[in-house]
DNA sequence: TTGCATGCAAAGTTTTTGCATGCAG
DNA sequence: CTGCATGCAAAAACTTTGCATGCAA
């Protein structure tokens, strides 16, 4: 636990927000003006891997495009990043009820939800048997 | 509908996949070797705005970090991008049932799900009254 | 002394944008 | 002629990485 790491952790935990790396960098730099962005990213990764903080990754890193314009949920493969259509109805009733609950519990205006199922596509399921230990999952 | 736009649309619709822009670029370039990446992005955006195809955007553009390491869902503000905790229980029973259904209907191995509620945070709700027409939503 | 974390800078990736050219109405 | 779409290149935004320095065990 270096001084830099400690300050980064304090700033991440300070409020109920979910800061971006550059927001964290700005706040930490007020206390440690010589710290670098590389150090911030390295320590955030390290502490996330130790379970001290949580890293919120975007559901997938790149935009994708779909010829199917109907509303539907997606299946994301956590090995290869592939996206497939989920053959279940959009707008499950339970989720609409949850939206209403959230509208009452928070001061947010709720307009919808985004739901994705995380798993392994058939090809990656097949390869999973002889997968080396060290390989990291995408999600 | 220019020739480039037509070929891009055909490649996007060709299969049930959800291609990235560079995958589309590679496939289109086999048929139109002089096409540029800029044209691909511009036409994908245009056709998405016309409803011919669907653009799948990542749920948020940047990584974020959270001092709260418990499992919980999130609320995303579609104006300012803020992320807040959703005060509802993780792992709703209906969603676990859906996961089981998907495991039977597809050849995916399902390991979990990612659920986010999309709306406007209190600050952006307040500003919404005198918002100019042209401003685009994040989601 | 040894090793690891740092600061700095550069590179990498994905997406957007400015600009001159050129085709079509 | 006019306007819009193109190709090309550069820029922008975010994240990772190589490397020399320096502190600490």
Image: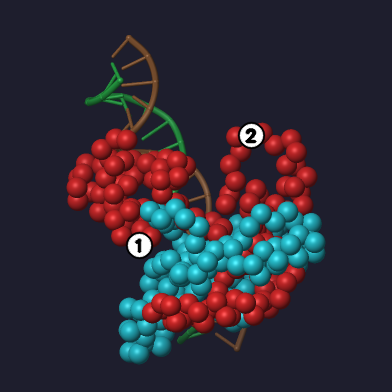
Chain colours: A cyan, B red, C green, D brown
Q: Label 2, secondary structure: give it.
A: loop
Labels 1 and 2: the sequence-earlier one: 1
Nearer to the camera, D22 or B116: B116
Q: How many numbered circles are shown?
A: 2
Q: Position of residue B98 (x, y in %)?
A: 55, 77
Q: Position of residue D3 (x, y in %)?
A: 39, 20
Tell me if residue B71 comes above or below residue A67 in the rendering. Answer: below
The residue to which callout 2 is attached is B133
Q: Mark 1 to mark 2: distance in Å?
A: 34 Å
The residue to which callout 1 is attached is B17
Q: Callout 1 environment at 10 Å: few (<14), some (14 to 19), or many (20+)?
A: some
Residue A38 visible in rendering: no
Q: Callout 2 environment at 10 Å: few (<14), some (14 to 19), or many (20+)?
A: few
Q: Position of residue B81 (x, y in %)?
A: 63, 53
At a point 56% along the width and 66% down the height, the residue shown is: A115
Nearer to the camera, A15 or B132: B132
Q: Quadrant of residue A4?
A: bottom right
Looking at the figure, which quarter contains the N terminus of chain B?
top left
At a point 70% along the width and 66% down the height, the residue shown is: A97
Q: Are marks 1 and 2 in contact (CB under 8 Å)?
A: no
Q: Left or right: where does residue A112 sit relative to residue A129?
A: right
Residue A72 visible in rendering: yes
Q: Label 1, secondary structure: give it.
A: loop
Q: Quadrant of residue C23?
A: top left
């Amino acid at each position: 636990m270096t001084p830099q790491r400690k300050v980064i952790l304090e700033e991440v935990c300070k409020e109920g927000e979910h800061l971006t790396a550059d927001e964290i960098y700005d706040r930490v730099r007020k206390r440690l003006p010589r710290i670098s962005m590389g150090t911030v990213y390295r320590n955030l990764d390290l502490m996330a891997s130790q379970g001290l903080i949580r890293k919120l990754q975007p559901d997938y890193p790149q935009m994708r495009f779909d010829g199917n314009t109907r509303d539907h949920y997606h299946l994301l493969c956590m090995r290869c990043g592939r996206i497939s259509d989920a053959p279940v109805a959009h707008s499950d009733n339970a989720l609409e009820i949850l939206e209403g609950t959230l509208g009452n519990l928070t001061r947010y205006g709720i307009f919808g939800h985004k739901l994705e199922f995380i798993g392994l596509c058939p090809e990656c399921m097949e390869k999973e048997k002889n997968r080396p230990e060290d390989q990291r999952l995408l999600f």
